């Protein structure tokens, strides 16, 4: 029991809308803010952190485009000792859970006793690209710029929206069902925010705006992707994107900005430090599938995680499946239910109960960390139990984490 891995602190920023309130915030600054706050919330000295594992995605959003070592710069800015080692890495959307898994391995191997895990994404800072200009500059004619965010695809593969929509249809998930789930996400988020449910996990940020010579400020304490004025009818009118058969801007999350961090240690170390764990980590698993099967990834990861610790779906009090698209959350939850309609209905009642990324936003490389903390806080409000969080990303990779709250 003393070797149990536990989470002792967690925090995230509000998630900004693309081009919204966080558009001027650098990925290093956002990272430093949550790193510092995670230590503060634990009530410990920053020197106890043995290593920082940080998901960063595309580093082009940093001013230091070439090898920006975002985790390293951020931990120094956060006031962690300069002797603290770190790793900035990219596993796309699964990075936020993979960071926890990497930290767990360090602890289990005896190389660390306390780790910080998390990630950051700042889509609003992503630059446009001019490729091949170094060697083949144009003497005459137009120069074409490239938007790396367009379609969010891969050179040799479909845009992810296409694969997700096709696989959803193959599993009997209609466009209408996806729109209904998107509507539910916003409705659930709105209710949860009104009830103050995100206060425990979110660190409000002071946003300054310049209007000529005048500077005004306000506190951002809500995820900007959320839309209070939304309807099924309005969602139904939206066109599908990038050639997808079902995926629209309405049943997808946005391109969002944000950061999240957690402190993980052993139960014994937490006791030595006088810390009360907020959750026990039962297991974390990573998997991958055929590249087009993005929407199925979370179901496979969750099945693997449950089997690893001898639990079943019936043992789980709450589920979080990241809403990369409504197509992903619905397809994976249906497969998890073995296509049993009654069981699927039961899972959906426990799934993303406070809304998901469609309303909260999807700051890709920290979303895995975000869904775990959202899960933990809701389990605490309900008196504890087992919860499972899963996320897909990057050509059908998927991670899952099972936690227990006493």
Image: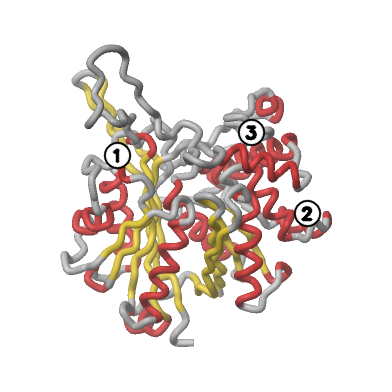
Dot 1 alpha-carbon crowd within 10 angstroms: few under 14, some 14 to 19, many 20 or more: some
Q: Count every numbered label the image shows and give the total.
A: 3
Q: At 70% across and 72% down in the image, what residue appears? A: 312
Instruction: Kindly report the distance in space between the C-alpha atoms of the residues bearing marks 1 and 2.
Output: 41 Å
Query: In the visual, does 355 lie left or right of 333?
Result: left
Q: At 54% across and 66% down in the image, what residue appears? A: 401
Q: Residue furthest left?
A: 82
Q: Position of residue 64 (x, y in %)?
A: 21, 43
Q: Position of residue 55 (x, y in %)?
A: 38, 55
Dot 3 alpha-carbon crowd within 10 angstroms: few under 14, some 14 to 19, many 20 or more: some
- Residue in the foreground of this view, choosing between 334 and 289: 289
Res 132 quadrant in image: top left
- Residue in the foreground of this view, choosing between 8 and 256: 256
> Which residue has dot 2 on it?
345
Residue 336 to residue 308: above or below: above
Residue 200 to residue 152: above or below: below
Q: Residue furthest top?
A: 141
Identify the mark nearer the N-term, 1 or 2.
1
Badge number at residue 25? 1
Q: Can residue 203 be seen by looking at this rendering?
A: no
Instruction: Kindly report the distance in space between the C-alpha atoms of the residues bearing marks 2 and 3.
Output: 26 Å
Query: In the visual, does 40 lie left or right of 294?
Result: left
Mark 1 touches mark 2? (CB < 8 Å): no
- Residue in the foreground of this view, choosing between 335 and 236: 335
Q: Position of residue 186 (x, y in %)?
A: 60, 39
> Which residue has dot 3 on it?
244
Identify the mark nearer the N-term, 2 or 3.
3
Q: Which image quadrant: the C terminus?
A: bottom right
């Amino acid at each position: 029991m003393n070797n149990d891995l536990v989470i002792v602190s967690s925090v995230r920023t509000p998630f900004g809308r693309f081009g919204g309130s966080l558009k001027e915030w650098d990925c290093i600054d956002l990272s430093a803010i949550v790193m510092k706050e995670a230590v503060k919330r634990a009530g410990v000295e920053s020197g106890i952190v043995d290593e920082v594992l940080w998901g960063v995605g595309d580093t082009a959003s940093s001013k230091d485009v070439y090898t920006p070592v975002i985790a390293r710069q951020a931990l120094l800015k956060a006031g962690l000792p300069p002797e603290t080692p770190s790793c900035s890495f990219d596993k796309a959307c699964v990075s936020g859970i993979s960071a926890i898994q990497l930290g767990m391995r360090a602890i289990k191997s005896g190389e660390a006793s306390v780790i910080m895990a998390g990630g950051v994404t700042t889509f609003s800072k992503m630059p446009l690209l001019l490729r091949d200009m170094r060697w083949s500059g144009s003497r005459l004619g137009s120069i074409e710029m490239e938007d790396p965010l367009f379609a969010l695809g891969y050179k040799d593969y479909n845009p992810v929206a296409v694969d997700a929509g096709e696989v959803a249809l193959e599993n009997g998930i209609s466009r209408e069902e996806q729109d209904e789930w998107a509507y539910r996400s916003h409705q659930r988020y709105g209710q949860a925010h009104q009830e103050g449910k995100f206060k425990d996990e979110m660190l409000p940020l002071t946003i300054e705006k310049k209007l000529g010579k005048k500077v005004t400020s306000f506190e951002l304490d809500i995820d900007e992707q959320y839309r209070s004025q939304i309807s099924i009818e309005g969602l139904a009118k939206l066109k599908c994107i990038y050639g997808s058969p079902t995926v629209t801007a309405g049943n997808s999350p946005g391109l969002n900005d944000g950061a999240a961090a957690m402190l993980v240690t052993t139960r014994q170390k937490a006791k030595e430090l006088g810390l009360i764990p907020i959750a026990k980590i039962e297991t974390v698993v990573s998997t991958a599938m055929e590249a087009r099967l993005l929407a199925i990834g979370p179901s496979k990861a969750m099945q693997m995680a449950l089997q690893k610790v001898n639990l079943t779906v019936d043992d789980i009090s709450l589920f979080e499946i990241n809403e990369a698209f409504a197509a992903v959350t619905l397809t994976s939850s249906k497969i998890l239910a073995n296509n049993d309609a009654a069981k699927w209905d039961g899972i959906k009642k426990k799934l993303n109960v406070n809304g998901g990324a469609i309303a909260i936003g999807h700051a890709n490389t920290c979303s895995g960390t975000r869904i775990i903390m959202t899960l933990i806080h809701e389990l605490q409000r309900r008196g504890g139990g087992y919860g499972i969080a899963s996320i897909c990303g990057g050509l059908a990779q998927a991670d899952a984490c099972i936690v227990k709250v006493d």
